[in-house]
Image (cartoon, rainbow, N blue to C red):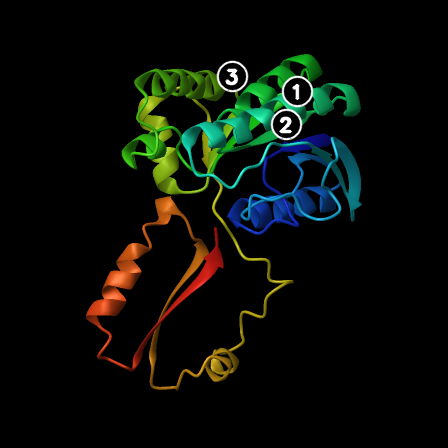
Amino acid sequence: MKVLILTQYFPPETGAPQNRLHSLAGYIADLGAEVSILTAMPNYPQMEIKEGYKGKWFKKEADGKLTIYRSWIFVAKGKGVLLRLCNYFSFVFTSLIIGLIKIKRHDIIICESPPLFLGLSALVLKWIMRSKLVFNVSDLWPESAEKLGIVTNKALLGVSYKLEEILYKNSSLVSGQTQGIIANIMQRFPGVNTVWLPNGIDFNQYDVSANGDTFRTNYGVTAEDFVLMYAGIVGHAQGLDVILEAAEILKTNQEIKFFIVGDG
């Protein structure tokens, strides 16, 4: 069996989808499948193409059992919606071109969303390769963007919601990172085949039996201190200002320590 994972985000970038998809690809390969990755030149979260990839339109790499195909992507440090859409659609275009001219037929295509628009590339590749499409939803888009006020243009939202419906209904399977995501999709599209695909821990990479003494020593935390930690993406959607507000209220309680671990 040949499996193609289509994602805008992949190591050496850091982040939840990067780590999750890299592990997933490795596990699928260990089961005997031939796994390829179609992704962008690494740039996230700094929004700057990493050394070794700058100025390249296409690059093919090997990572253990994985074959990685990378295509050019537009990146800019600005935060405007237009710049972000240019970032998304540039990879939609280049991933489709590379997929058509560099990659042979695969039995299954796993497409990571967001960005939702990458589903356009996945749909075309699915039809041309005669593959089955698994659409993995790690964040409900455009719903989350609308609720957060990131996207307010009614026309863009309308097109995005319609694309979302088309992608779900043309997928053999829609997987979701949380039970809430799956419940939302099942409520709005009861005929769509869905499955909960939760995040996990690779026990080969982490010693889950270790205690926190080393961490506390390294960061000046005593055994009596109460530690509150957030680990993950640092971005608009995470609402991390609530941690700063809580820390301000509790700043006289020296035994309470807050840690924010992440990037974005």
Res 101 quadrant in image: top right
Q: Residues within 10 Å of mark 3 (few under 14, many from 20)?
A: some
User: Label 3 to label 2, Cα distance in Å?
Assistant: 12 Å
Horizontal relation, residue 83 to residue 122: left or right:
left
Earlier in the chain: of badge 3 and badge 1, it is 1
Earlier in the chain: of badge 1 and badge 2, it is 2
**Pick the front one: 163 or 12:** 12
Residue 236, given in percent of the width and then of the height, sits at 37, 45
Residue projecting furthest to the top: 128
Where residue 162 is drawn, which disc sits there?
none
Q: Which residue is mark 3?
A: 170
Earlier in the chain: of badge 3 and badge 2, it is 2
Q: Are marks 3 and 1 in contact (CB under 8 Å)?
A: no
Residue 79, given in percent of the width and then of the height, sits at 43, 38
**Pick the front one: 103 or 80:** 80
Q: Which residue is mark 2?
A: 109
Residue at the spot 54% in from the left edge and 76% down from the top edge: 210
User: Label 3 to label 1, Cα distance in Å?
Assistant: 11 Å
Decide if residue 139 is in sight here.
Answer: yes
Decide if residue 172 is in sight here.
Answer: no
Res 24 quadrant in image: top right
User: Label 1 to label 2, Cα distance in Å?
Assistant: 7 Å
